[in-house]
Image (cartoon, rainbow, N blue to C red):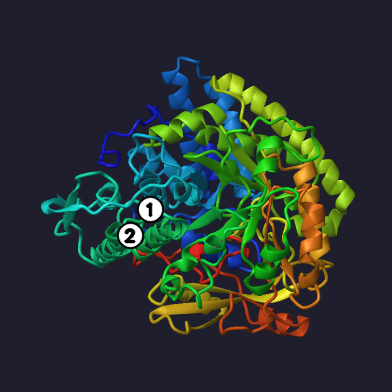
Amino acid sequence: SDYERKPLSRIPTDSFRLEDGFVDRFKDKKAPFGFNGLGELVYYRTYSRIKSDGTNERWHDTVQRVVEGTFSMQKGWMQSQELGWDEAKTQAQAQEMFERIFNFKFLPPGRGLWAMGSNLTEERGLYAALNNCAFVSTSIPEGCNVSKPFCFLMDASMLGVGVGFDTAAASQGIKVLEPDEFNRSTYVVPDSREGWVEAVGLLIDSYFQHGASAMDFDFSQIRPKGTPIKGFGGIASGSGVLESLIEDIRSILQPLAKNGKSLGISTVVDLMNLIGKCVVAGNVRRTAEIAFGPPRDDEYLNLKNYEENPQRLPHGWASNNSVYAEVGMDYTDVCERINDNGEPGLAWLENMRKYGRMGDPPDSKDQRAMGGNPCLEQTLESFELCCLVETFPTNHESLEDFKATLESALLYAKTVTLGHTHWPEANRVMSRNRRIGCSMTGIAQFITKNGLDELKTWCEEGYAHVRECDRKYAESLGVPGSIKLTSMKPSGTVSLLAGATPGMHYPESRYYLRRVRIPGNSDLLEPLEAAGYDIEDAIGQEGTKVVSIPVDAGEGIRTTKEVSMWEQLSLAAFLQRHWADNQVSCTVTFDPETEGPHLKHALDYFQYQLKGISFLPKLPAGAYPQMPYEAIAEEDYKKAITKISSLDFSTKKDNQPERLPPPDLYCDTGNCTPLK
């Protein structure tokens, strides 16, 4: 079967190491975390691994692990392909990358900070875990198992990869069949990621193969609830969540089989959403889903109408739902729904396939693209994964300095493409495309400081430099140039480390409280309390604390109240024209009363300038208690900041080395729905 445990193709590793004297220079240097301790808290909460002596990594430790892991992948690849290896040259490149990550000029994705250079890549070869996102089409080729796209989404999600999917299978007339109840088979589920995925695959396929045995499952080998999960971290949920998923799948497919029905849109999305719900309940790191469907199909468009589909309420949250918009279509019906609850989002597949940057002539190089990732900053083929990196233009003094950062950032992402996954379909696509996403974040801060025309210059010259660097490194690594190179990701916790506004989005307020949830028994609490931060019990989450951190987004910065829907769309189009050859992830916040009636007209104009967009109606302030962001007045900020002293996490020891913090109950950007 596709998902039984099999040996992974690991890059032969002759480990690369930074010179000891170089790393020593940073051991006592204070890392420039952003936002009054928020960045440092998020780092220790989310990305600092446990070292062999039981202490947490400090920032220089994490950067060293990531950089050495990156160059070890390169070295293993170069030696295995007999391409030669220049130790002195790469030592200089590695030191350059170290300094630029340490000083928050660029950062790998969060999963890269967590996994790169760890045993996940160095020993187990799980390079898929280094990728941010993926897409899979549910279109089932003749002779393939119906379960394949569902299993791929589950497997990738359990590795923390966000996955997009379409509803193509619903148009293939695939009959749901009754399994043979008189010829039952029992699958003993192994205590592994592969075992869980295999169980789901066997069950789904039993409803689509003539004469297939009815499936029973033995869950006795699955570790008990509360057992630590090695490698990825977290606490085992026990077999209960998988058992629930098995029963949920049966409850959906069995009635369809009895009534001779075919696989439909609702069933496709239900199965994917139920899988996502199981993955999160299984204590796996945060992931996300996005569904893409037809723009005029009421069944699809009403999936999140819980008055009409109340049975979907327990799992419908698991994906953002977007439509494949068509250039020239009538947006009236879609916009009425958006004005109500912000969905669906829109993806113009025609533009995704036809264009790189929208300001360049069409090149049609992405004709095999079929969708995108959950935050819609990447164009993707089916089974394609992609690695994204973030650069921070505001942390640079000059364009030349920024170009040097872009080179290091591209080299990191290009290196990730060297690592094969355990999915042959994905390896074929990724080896051909080598798609990456060099992103910028803190755009609102850059515009405030330098102006829009300077941003245009940095975008244009930066993009040209990225293309030149890709040509150079593709040649030296002996791989194809990347089909596309740049994007604008929405950003989340990674931007918090550097004290940057997320992606291209403006803050809700210059001054605000940023609330972070951490376990009630976390050893992070003691230094936070000593430094004077406000800490309270989380409402509705027993055993969890909420830390409130006062933040100043920067002098002169405008807020979402001052930036109209039209300006947000214009900025997205600007970045799609001058920077992103993949896509721009943008969630436009709008006033349903004053701007809602203009949505249709806005899309009529911007459909020619964008590849994807989503919208979010503005919520009233204080819509629910302990919101992750709460605007405050300047005097309240100043009062809060005077109570806080310097944070010192350096002497902490983790008393829960395998426990992960509960994720924040929201999406960092308002764009992608985290499975939470």
Question: Where residue 262 is drawn, which disc sits there?
Answer: 1
Where does residue 605 sit, x and y in percent of width and height?
Answer: 82, 54
Where does residue 469 sit, x and y in percent of width and height?
Answer: 68, 28
Quarter of image, res 657: bottom left
Q: Nearer the viewer, residue 612 or 264?
A: 264
Quarter of image, res 534: bottom right
Q: Which of 259 and 107 is in front in this view?
A: 259
Q: Is mark 1 on a helix, strand or loop?
A: loop
Q: Is residue 534 above or below residue 561?
A: below
Left or right: residue 248 compared with residue 610: left
Residue at 48%, 21% (x, y): give it: 78
Q: How many marks?
A: 2
Q: How packed is label 1: few (under 14 Cα within 10 Å), some, or many (20 or more)?
A: many
Q: Is mark 2 on a helix, strand or loop?
A: helix
Q: Is residue 627 visible?
A: yes
Quadrant placement of the C terminus: bottom left
Q: Nearer the viewer, residue 605 or 374?
A: 605
Left or right: residue 505 compared with residue 380: right
Question: Where residue 550 is drawn, which disc sits there?
Answer: none
Q: Is residue 173 above or below residue 550?
A: above
Q: Which of 31 and 675 is in front in this view?
A: 675
Q: How packed is label 2: few (under 14 Cα within 10 Å), some, or many (20 or more)?
A: many
For label 2, the residue is 256
